[in-house]
């Protein structure tokens, strides 16, 4: 039997960081991981976090929990038939309802091959503190991801005071009293914490939830036609509506040869120089983003 872990958590909370950390630790212990990644956008951006020697299946442009159950079965079948691995890590989109995403794995086809260990939810503590700013639907999704976790990774504590960390932990525990909570920066947890998980699922739990069926979050792929001034770009970000939750990709900046690796999650911007010439594209994820005017944009995407 191969152990399966589902990584859940809101957009930009630190799931990919968790994935990289877990992969490194499994490999160090001689345990072979395989990965299924589900991304909301068209850009296979997060797969950079997975080394080339690791079996990887990507499910782009759709949420496992809404549309992808059959696709997921097919991906699992291909992995099981053709790849040698001991443990499977499934990273869901930040828009996925964790129980419904897991439902896609609960196929009788795999009952004797997969041992589903549980849902690990990464919670962005900073965003949690200001969750009132989220739309009711999004807040609900955030709560559901925490409520159904078997382990909660309370991440980004480096951005909080000690008192805030304490308060957030108490609040998360009040929502989910059975899941252990680990406070982290950059989602650094030990694999021992997840190997000890023994999740139990009830069919009832799967039937009751329905939030993931209405995908109110959408994604948009934008291609830059020319380099952008960094300050102008950051100013544009500061003026974005609160309903833009996540952006990532490569941005061509004036004065630089290659587009920069760019990440935006909850007010925080991260730039990293890139040594290869990557396609100048970003994915924008949020609500009502179709009409969003993008800096430097002169026409349609
Ligand atoms: N300050 C701080 N930043 C963090 C921490 N963890 C992750 N980040 C940053 O947050 C951004 C998002 O991290 P990811 O690991 O890509 O988050 P994700 O949940 O996989 O994002 P999506 O797949 O888009 O939902 C990146 O810029 C990370 O560097 C943390 O503990 N503290």
Image (cartoon, rainbow, N blue to C red):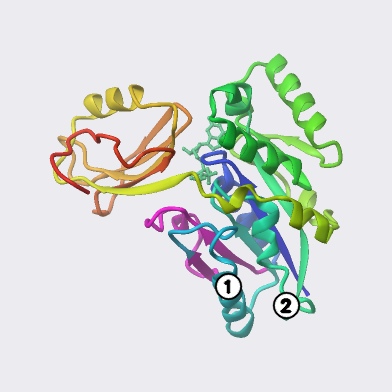
Who comes first in sequence, dot 1 or dot 2? Answer: 1
- Which residue appears at 65% of the width and 66% of the height? 104
Secondary structure beneath label 2: helix
Along the viewing direction, whichever of 17 and 60 lies nearer the viewer: 60
Looking at the rendered image, the disc whose residue lies closer to the viewer, 1 or 2, is 1
Label 2 beta carbon less than 8 Å to ligand 1? no
Q: CA distance from mark 1 to mark 2?
A: 13 Å
Compared across the picture, whether 61 is left or right of 33 comes to left
Number of numbered discs visible in the structure rendering: 2
- Which residue appears at 62% of the width and 20% of the height? 160
Tell me which segment is drawn in magenta: 32-58
**Residue 247 falls in image quadrant:** top left
Residue 222 is a magenta residue: no
From the top left corner, tell me how far across and down residue 51 is, in percent. Answer: 50, 62
- Which residue appears at 28% of the width and 22% of the height? 235
> Would you say the residues marked 1 and 2 are in contact, meaning their CB atoms lie under 8 Å apart?
no
The residue that label 1 is drawn on is 70
The residue that label 2 is drawn on is 110
Badge 1, how many Cα within 10 Å: few under 14, some, many 20+? few
From the top left corner, tell me how far across and down residue 108 is, in percent. Answer: 75, 77
Secondary structure beneath label 1: helix
From the top left corner, tell me how far across and down residue 107 is, in percent. Answer: 71, 73
Compared across the picture, whether 141 is left or right of 112 comes to left
Q: Residue furthest bottom?
A: 81
Disc assigned to residue 118: none
Compared across the picture, whether 216 is left or right of 274 comes to right
From the top left corner, tell me how far across and down residue 40 is, in percent. Answer: 46, 53
- Which residue appears at 18% of the width and 47% of the height? 300
Badge 2, how many Cα within 10 Å: few under 14, some, many 20+? some
Up the image or down, 58 lies above or below 12; here it is below
Q: Quadrant of the N terminus?
A: bottom right
């Amino acid at each position: 039997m191969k152990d399966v872990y589902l990584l859940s958590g809101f957009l930009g909370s630190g799931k990919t960081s968790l994935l990289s950390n877990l992969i490194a630790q499994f490999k160090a212990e001689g345990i072979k991981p395989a990965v299924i990644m589900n991304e909301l956008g068209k850009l296979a951006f997060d797969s950079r976090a997975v080394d080339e020697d690791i079996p990887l299946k990507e499910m782009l442009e759709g949420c496992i929990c809404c549309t992808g159950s059959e696709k997921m079965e097919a991906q699992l079948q291909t992995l099981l038939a053709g790849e040698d691995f001991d443990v499977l890590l499934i990273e869901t989109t930040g828009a996925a309802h964790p129980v419904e995403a897991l439902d896609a794995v609960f196929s009788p086809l795999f009952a004797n091959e997969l041992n589903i260990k549980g849902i690990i939810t990464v919670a962005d503590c900073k965003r949690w503190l200001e969750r009132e700013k989220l739309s009711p639907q999004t807040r609900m999704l955030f709560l559901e991801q925490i409520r159904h976790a078997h382990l909660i990774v309370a991440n980004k504590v480096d951005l909080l005071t000690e008192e805030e960390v304490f308060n957030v932990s108490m609040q998360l525990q009040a929502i989910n009293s059975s899941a252990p909570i680990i406070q982290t920066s950059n989602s650094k947890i030990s694999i021992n914490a997840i190997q000890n998980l023994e999740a139990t699922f009830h069919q009832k739990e799967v039937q009751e939830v329905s939030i993931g069926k209405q995908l109110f979050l959408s994604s948009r792929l934008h291609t830059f036609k020319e380099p952008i001034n960094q300050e102008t770009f950051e100013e544009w970000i500061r003026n974005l509506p609160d309903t833009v939750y996540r952006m990532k990709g490569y941005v061509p900046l004036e004065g630089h040869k290659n587009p920069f690796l760019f990440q935006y999650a909850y007010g925080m911007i991260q730039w990293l120089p890139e040594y290869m010439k990557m396609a100048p594209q970003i994915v924008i994820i949020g609500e009502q983003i179709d009409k969003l005017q993008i800096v430097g944009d002169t026409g349609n995407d």
